[in-house]
């Protein structure tokens, strides 16, 4: 089996020097391979198909909706705890006030 490698001419640099690597191909403005040139500067969204992007968007919206519902539930629970605490404080203050009035009335009655 005779394998002959075909060497391609190299593009000279601006100084007239040539690369020592014979396997390098000359550079071109667009890198055509087996496929047409890729849009390297375009966003990832343009490189995916529409229905794939829409599925991803639906998933993101579902996650955001669930997250907001959980936050709302947490906020509601926190508010309920706060209201219960305030009611307890008011009841305690009322009991204390009644005890003081009772003590004053009792002291006045004894004298």
Image (cartoon, rainbow, N blue to C red):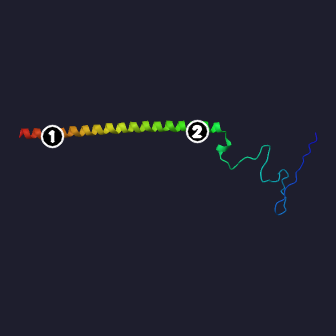
Residue 94 in the image: state x and y as whole percent. 22, 39
Q: Determine the image quadrant of residue 50.
A: top right
What's the mark number on residue 12? none
Residue 44 in the image: state x and y as whole percent. 65, 44
Quick one: which residue is furthest to the left in this view? 111
Where disc 1 sits, the SS reads: helix
Where disc 2 sits, the SS reads: helix
Tag 1–tag 2 contact (CB < 8 Å): no
Q: Residue 24 vs residue 94: left or right?
A: right
What's the mark number on residue 57? 2
The nearer-to-camera label among 1 and 2 is: 2
Quick one: which residue is furthest to the bottom in this view? 15
> In front here: 43 or 88?
43
Q: Determine the image quadrant of residue 4.
A: top right
Mark 2: few/some/many CA within 10 Å (<14, 14-19, 20+): few
The residues bearing labels 1 and 2 have C-alpha atoms spaced at a distance of 65 Å
On the rendered image, what quadrant is the N terminus found in? Answer: top right
Mark 1: few/some/many CA within 10 Å (<14, 14-19, 20+): few
Residue 12 in the image: state x and y as whole percent. 84, 59
Q: Residue 13 vs residue 55: left or right?
A: right
What's the mark number on residue 101? 1
- Residue sitting at x 43%, y 38%: 72
On the rendered image, what quadrant is the C terminus found in? Answer: top left
């Amino acid at each position: 089996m005779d394998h002959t490698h075909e060497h391609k001419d190299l593009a000279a640099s601006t100084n007239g020097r040539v690369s020592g690597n014979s396997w390098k191909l000359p550079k071109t403005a667009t890198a055509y391979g087996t496929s047409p040139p890729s849009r390297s500067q375009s966003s990832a969204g343009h490189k995916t198909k529409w229905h794939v992007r829409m599925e991803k968007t639906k998933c993101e919206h579902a996650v955001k909706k669930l997250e907001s519902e959980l936050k709302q539930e947490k906020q509601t629970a926190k508010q309920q705890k706060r209201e219960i605490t305030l009611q307890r404080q008011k009841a305690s203050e009322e009991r204390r006030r009644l005890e003081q009035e009772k003590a004053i009335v009792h002291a006045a009655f004894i004298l």
